[in-house]
Image (cartoon, rainbow, N blue to C red):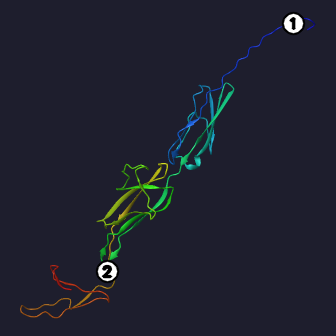
Amino acid sequence: LNGCTKSDTITAKVKPLPLVKATAITPICEGDALCLNTDNAGSNAIYSWTGPNFTSSSQTPKRANATAAMSGQYKIVVTLNGCIAKDSVNTLVHAKPSFNVIVTKGSCTNSIVNSDASISLVNVLNGIKYDLVNGKSYTGNKTVSTATTIPSSGIILNNIANPDSVDYYSIRVFDISGCFKDSTFKLNRQTCACDGASPVVIPESQNICKGDTFQVVHGYVDAGYTVDWYDAQGNLLLK
């Protein structure tokens, strides 16, 4: 000023932005844990995650029992020494297949149970393949690439013989991504009985002496039925 000069100095320090790199294990299946992660920005760093119905201040938050509604974009804001860095990651949670199992017992021919019981899948949503095993839990080793395609009829097992008591089955149904759902069910023994009234035999019993002749025995049944006669040892006497 007016030919005079004066000087001074100022020190400027440029602080580095905190480390931030949002990652996630994705895609995952419904029911798995949705795990988020970002770089460790230092002991004084502040983390702020936001996402679908979600907030967290953890560096590595986890959402247990994930659902399809948790799919979407998750954003992370890291603050360190007054500096802010941001990143985001997209996630996808596949919904498990849904289905119902229909177990049909064997049909009856009079008192005989036919070997035509069946197991069907109905109301299948997102499922494309299945694996069926005997037992109260799934013990198979199939994957979506090796399992059996669900038939258009939905019938996955037929011509099943009547069980001695009860047979248990377990099924695993896969979607196209490999996610699966298990279900256990049972086939109960079928019991068939002849329709109509029991036959009436007249006389029901008779006592005779050696050398005498048996009285004529009459059997009466409902219309449409026939009578077979057997002796006490089960030998067929007359049809």
- Please report the residue visible at 57 percent of the width from the left and 28 percent of the height from the top: 40
Q: Secondary structure at mark 1?
A: loop
Instruction: Identify the mark at residue 194; answer none if there is no mark.
Output: 2
Question: Picture quarter containing residue 227?
Answer: bottom left
Q: Nearer the viewer, mark 2 or mark 1?
A: 1
Q: Is residue 90 left or right of residue 229?
A: right
- Please report the residue visible at 68 percent of the width from the left and 29 percent of the height from the top: 84
Question: Picture quarter containing residue 161?
Answer: bottom left
Residue 47: percent from left, percent from top = 62, 32
Q: Is residue 214 left or right of residue 104?
A: left
Question: Callout 2, which amino acid?
Answer: Cys
Q: In the displayed structure, would residue 116 be above or below residue 14?
A: below
Question: Picture quarter containing residue 203?
Answer: bottom left
Q: Is residue 126 left or right of residue 115?
A: right
| Total marks in image | 2
* The N terminus - image quarter: top right
